[in-house]
Image: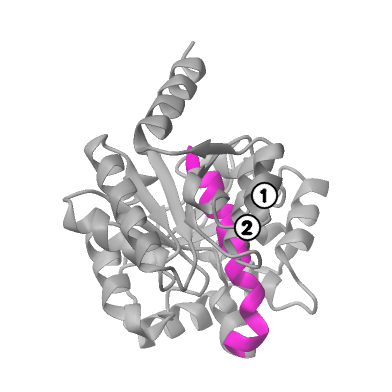
Amino acid sequence: MQLALETRKQNFRSISPMLEMGAYEALWDKPGMSFKKIAELFHAQPDSLPSDFVEQSTALQYYMLARDHLFRAHVQDFGIRIHRTGEYPEKLRDATYPVELLYYRGWWDLVESRAVAVVGSRNPSPQGLMRTRKVVRELVKDDYTIVSGLAVGVDTAAHREAIAQGGRTIAVIGTPLTEAYPRINAKLQSDIAKNFLLISQIPVMRYERFGPKVNRFFFPERNITMSALTKATIITEAGNTSGTLIQARAALQQGRQLFILDSCFKNPGLTWPAKYEAQGAIRVSEYDDIKEHLRVAHAHANR
């Protein structure tokens, strides 16, 4: 198990990963809890940790429950990252309601690599899949880590192409580490956890208690985190009601670049591309357009 057992010092305060993990799980077990409510709780008390809101005995009880559930699912090599400790990615604070704790498996250092999210429809056209693979190939050549959500369709194509090209990939999932959704991607999820990086912000016990139908709202929330982790989001193909558009909104709100392929604009049935272009999204015809915009943004950030 990669969960560090040693304590860490933050402002002369010892932090126990076990205690914070258990407290996070306990917070989520309260009625009506959401990322918004948790973020507001911490915003009101900005120097707090999860354990400041939960009795120690309760936090330890929830830690044991969650740990045992992870172990039963054969997830032993996991770690956590807690806000206000050294390895928590501060770029996540750009989200409107940033997460306080992340679970992960794999190569954590990938969160600090140059990363771009490639996302889109769960039911893409053959042309959409072709464009996705082409964009990913070019990003890998330019040494970008490919981030996506492990859903069927565009997400799966992005992850698989990154791996096939010898690149790096991060999957941000909408379930706990104990689950693989969709089941068809269970092996791909396992391979990413073993060789790359798998991230979840989803509480284990809350998800177990209510099941996937009630917990569907976790999926769009992971899109917000996915955007915050990356320099840019590229949408290769998506319908007017696609969950991908949640990530489009988040990218613009977080000050990230949002690229929309020209083919989306040329589909007469789609209204969303023009809407997001008017809000600051970038219409691109070729990968060279994306490359140049990323280069300029990088140069500007390093002035």
Where is residue 118 shown, x and y percent of the image?
A: 43, 52
Residue 245 is labelled as: 2
Q: Quadrant of residue 91?
A: top right
Q: Distance between the residues labelled 1 and 2?
A: 6 Å
| Residue found at x 63% / y 34% | 255
Q: Which SS type dominates the magenta stretch?
A: helix
* Residue 258 magenta: no
Disc 1 marks a residue whose amino acid type is Arg
| Residue found at x 63% / y 87% | 213
* Residue 226 magenta: yes
Answer yes or no: do the residues labelled 1 and 2 have beta carbons within 8 Å?
yes
Q: Quadrant of residue 23?
A: bottom right
| Magenta part of the chain | 211-232
Circle 1 SS class = helix
Circle 2 SS class = helix
Query: Seen in the image, is 272 located left or right of residue 69?
Result: right
Residue 249 is labelled as: 1
Tally of numbered tags: 2
Outermost residue on the top side: it is 303
Query: Seen in the image, is 250 located left or right of residue 287?
Result: right
Quadrant where the N terminus sits is: bottom left
| Residue found at x 46% / y 73% | 123
Quick one: label 2, few (<14), some, or many (20+) residues within 10 Å?
Answer: many
Quick one: label 1, few (<14), some, or many (20+) residues within 10 Å?
Answer: some
Q: In this rendering, is residue 12 above or below 67?
A: above
| Residue found at x 31% / y 58% | 130
Query: Seen in the image, is 104 located left or right of residue 212?
Result: left
**From this viewpoint, is residue 82 visible?**
no
Q: How is the image coloured?
A: one colour
Q: In this rendering, is residue 157 above or below 44?
A: below
Residue 53 is labelled as: none
In-front residue for pair 17/208: 208
